[in-house]
Every structure is written in C-alpha cells, then in structure tokens.
Amino acid sequence: MSVRNLWKIVSRATVAAVAIGGISVISISKLSSNDESFYHTLAMPLLHRLDPEIAHGLAIKCASLGLVPRQSVQDPIELETTVFGHKFSNPIGLAAGFDKQAEAINGLLQMGFGFIEVGSVTPLPQDGNPKPRVFRLSEDRAIINRYGFNSNGCDAVAQKLDKWHKNKGKSSGVIGINLGKNKISDSPIEDYVKGIQVLGKYADYIVINVSSPNTPGLRALQRKDELQALIARVSTEREKLENKPALLIKLAPDLTLQDKQDIAYMILKEKIMISGLILCNTTVKRPSYLMNNSKNEAGGLSGPPLREMSTKAIYDMYRLTEGKVPIIGVGGIQSGEDAYEKIRAGASLIQILTVLTYNGPSVIQKMKKDLLLLLRQDGFKSIQEAVGIDHKNK
C-alpha cells in the first residue's frame, strides 16, 4: 500500500472518529429536541464530515435508539387525513430509501411523521452497487445515489417487522413497504410476488417500485404491456392476504406524456387494481445549473432540482386520472410551501428524504407548522379540501 493511500485511510478514520465523538458528547436532550439552530450549526455539519453512506448509517442508528426529536403534542386536526382506508395524523411521510431494513420504525414515527415507508426490499439479500454510491451536492442541496437496491432481503426484514408488530402494535403509525427486484433475477414479476407473500401482512400499503434508475432493466417495467402483466400478477397475490394492503406503483419523473396517458388509461378504462401512485422517483436528468463537482456521477438525482419535474408529474397524473387515484407526492420538498404546492397539484400525501440530509429532523415540525398556516390562509379546514385545488381553479 502506498503512503498516499495509507494517509487517506488514516485521515478518513480520524474525521469519522472526530465526527462521531463530537456527536457522542452532545447531550441526549439536544439530540431529542427540535432545536433548529442546533441541527443547523452543530449536528448536521458534524455528520457532513463523514462519508454520506456512513452518515446515513449513523442517522439510522440514532433513530433506532430513539436519539431523535420526539413530537410531544398531537397534530392539528386540519392536518389529519384518510387515504387508502387509513387515518394519517398528518400528510408528511418518510420516503423509501432511508430505513431500507426496517431498523428504526419507532424512532422515526416518534419524530412526527404521519407514515413511514420501509425499503426498497428485494426477495434475496444483495449488496447493491459498488461504493462509493452516494454523493452530496451541497451547493445544490441535492443528492445523487446509485445504491442499487442494497437489501438484507425479505426474510430478514420480515423478522424485524414481526418483532415490531408484536412489541409495539400497528396503532403507532401507518407503514408502507417498498418492494424491488433482485439485480440478477429469472423473473422480475415473481420477485414482486415473493415480496408480497413475505411482507404483505405487515404493510398498510405496498409499493411496487419499477422506477429506480439504479437497477438495469427495471424502468422497462413501466411500459404498458409489462406493467399490465406485473399489476395483474401482484394484484392476484395481494387478494390472498387477509389485511388487503393498498397497492401502489412508484413511477419515474422522466416518463413521456404517452407513458402517462397509457398508465392513466389502464387505471381508468381497464380498471387495473391499483390503489394509488407515488410520484416520483429520482431522475437521471442533470439540469445545467447544478454546481457541485459530483453532478455528473451516475445515479438518481434527488432534492430541489427534482421539485418542478415532480410537481408536473403529479399535476399531469391527477388530471389524466380525473382525481380518482390518490397520489403520494415526493421530490424536492424543502418546506411547507413546497409540500402545499404538491398537495394543490393533486397529492393526497407527501414524502420527504433529501431535505433531512441538509436540515436535520427539526424540519418535520417546521414543515407541518408552515403547511397548517398556508391551509388556514386559504380558508381550508382540512388537507382533503386542498388536494388538487389548482385544477379546480382553472
């Protein structure tokens, strides 16, 4: 090993030790508070001294141990909503990609999320793509990831979910499970069937993820014929479950208008058994204004550069499905105003993830406060009244 490579390893280990050590001396009361300035000036800068994937793992560990802000009061009644037959205390959820292995559900729910989406989970364990595979674009407040469905597999995640159900019960929050396929698979459709068979009984809703850009061939499943065959098969399997979880499809932001029209037609005219849509996944596009040096890394881009593309996808699909299919809006949400924009475009619920990397967990409560203020300013008494209102005003 060269002296230069050895120095790099030592330097990274030192930075990690300093960052973790710095966090460890912070009082638990601070970690468990919603002190915005604390996360902005101390906690997040320390985490950003770590490799992004290591920081991600540390954040999951903190959440699993309960070392996160805890919501101490009930959400305002105006934020309560019912979707897919389930009551959500508020419309802000955690997107898939954070708690991939169902390690920190309780801690995450205690932070004030209305719902948590676990995964993506693949049938068999797989390591995902080679590291490094996560890149912060700090100047753009964005992230590029090419994880590639790194997963402990359905059986391991089922054990975690079974333990959570037995110890805590389902009453503490709405849980979605996001399913993916293995990179090497004889039958992608059967991969999703296996996921439903093993994990479906633990889910309030199931997501069929056919839109990650980091698994070769996956997005081809969004084509009309392939998607029809997939949905028909997984719908049949879902009907065998006693709890009948809602069945959602997560789509890419890069779909053509024809793709969107085909999917809407399948839902409305052919009446495929889809409960809702998640719009949208990360994008492979790279806006010209990106500033960070990692902007050309392969993978899916998330954060503010995705916001307008995501909102347009929500608006289009709400219009094409005539507002008959609930939509979870995700992509570039940084504030209550961004969340409200997606709700007005047609989203019944919204999800966040990348913003947590830059703002920390205190952003959840701020987002809810700002969203509530916007609802009241416009005279709405509930989230449901605001969903899709931009279509009605035209």
Image (spheres, grey):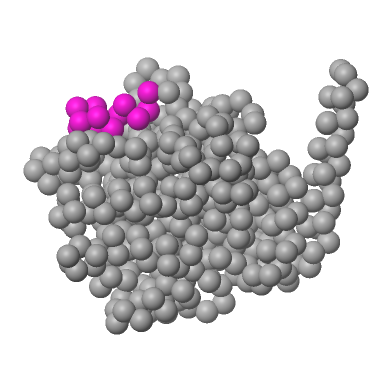
Q: Is residue 158 above or below residue 393?
A: above
- At which x and y percent is residue 67? 68, 62
- Is residue 220 shown in magenta? yes
Choose between 305 and 342: the one closer to the eye.
305
Q: Is residue 279 above or below residue 76?
A: above
Report whether 321 appears left or right of 175: left
For the view shown, which residue lies furthest in the front direction? 289
Seen at 32% across and 63% down, the residue is 343
Q: Is residue 216 above or below residue 362?
A: above
Report whether 383 appears left or right of 212: left
Q: Is residue 200 above or below residue 210?
A: below
Is residue 271 in view? no
* Quarter of the view holding residue 274: top left
Is residue 311 in view? yes
- At which x and y percent is residue 166? 50, 55
Locate the N terminus by quadrant: top right
Seen at 43% across and 47% down, the residue is 306
For the view shown, which residue lies furthest in the left direction? 269
Report whether 307 appears left or right of 70: left
Seen at 46% across and 74% down, the residue is 370
* Image label count: 0
- At which x and y percent is residue 318? 22, 54
- At which x and y percent is residue 230? 26, 31
* Main secondary-structure element of the magenta-colored stretch: helix
- Is residue 224 shown in magenta? yes
* Quarter of the view holding residue 69: bottom right
In the rendered structure, which segment of residues is drawn in magenta?
A: 217-230
For the view shown, which residue lies furthest in the right direction? 3
Choose between 209 and 137: the one closer to the eye.
137
Seen at 17% across and 65% down, the residue is 394
